[in-house]
Amino acid sequence: MATAIPTSHPPHTESAYAIIVAGGSGTRMQSAIPKQFLLLDGKPVLMHTIDAFYSTAFTPAIILVLPADYHSYWEQLCTTYNFKTPHQLVTGGATRFHSVKNGLEIIPDNTNTLIAVHDAVRPLISKDIIEKSYFHAAEHGNAVTAIKSRDSVRLHENGISKSLIRDDVYLVQTPQTFKSEQIKNAYLQSFSTKFTDDASVVEETGLKINLVEGSYQNIKITFPEDIAIAEMILKSR
């Protein structure tokens, strides 16, 4: 897996953005509120995620994509927790694809702009990985965070399962970071159910996707036990 070596200052870009996608409903968390609003170490998960990006050397402009029904709830949380990290609120769409597209539409066109897209419920993302992702995208056009599978992997197809070479299998995470021209052009396509993330959308245009090393601690808060795991990781840092 290729990785970029960060320097002490960001490369020359007109601007950097981070689109934080928060569309979760909380169903699998068995929670009355979406998982991005659950408390982690005393404040909502989403606040950890936003702060992780804003605290990097790139200090990106942050676009939070949130279902319309939760805008006022989020604003109340910001008041309650005195959350003042700058961000712009955008209404989410019917799918993740449409939510990202809505976020992209408010970013001015500029080929030097870097745009990272990140899951709101990956609050443990590190400063180093975020910066590495921006640096690599600046140099190579895009950077998709991924980790090698630790488990044996099998492909099940047409009723038959077959073993895959574990070292060839990567588990994709976020952030996924792109030069503006790449991702904006990709999102001019019509929606397809095969688009599972931003990399798959950009790849459909014929571009090569570059992987950068993520972290096994960069977990996605999906199930109730994930909050407890995240708390333990935070305490160990």
Image (cartoon, rainbow, N blue to C red):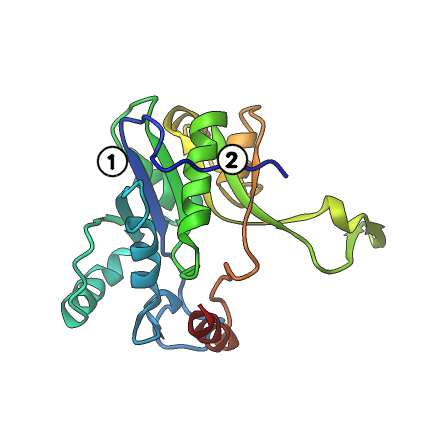
Mark 2–mark 1 Cα distance, whole angstroms, equals: 29 Å
Q: Is residue 190 visible?
A: no
Q: Identify the residue position indicated by label 1 in the image.
A: 106
Residue at 29% x, 62% y: name it: 47
Q: Is residue 60 left or right of residue 124?
A: left
Q: Is residue 52 visible?
A: yes
Residue 49 in picture, x, y percent from top left = 35, 58
Residue at 21% x, 49% y: name it: 87
Circle on res. 32: none
Neighbours of disc 1 within 10 Å: few (<14), some (14-19), many (20+) = few
Image quadrant where one finds the N terminus:
top right
Identity of the amino acid at label 2?
Answer: Ala
Residue most extreme to the front: 8
Image quadrant where one finds the C terminus:
bottom left
Residue 96 in picture, x, y percent from top left = 43, 48
From the viewer's perspective, is the residue at label 2 or at label 1 nearer? Answer: 2
Circle on res. 4: 2
Residue at 42% x, 28% y: name it: 138
Looking at the image, is 140 positioned above or below residue 63? Answer: above
Q: Secondary structure at mark 2?
A: loop
Q: Secondary structure at mark 1?
A: loop
Looking at the image, is 55 positioned above or below residue 185? Answer: below
Residue at 27% x, 31% y: name it: 15
Looking at the image, is 24 positioned above or below residue 86? Answer: below
Q: Compare marks 2 and 1 and give the one earlier in the sequence.
A: 2
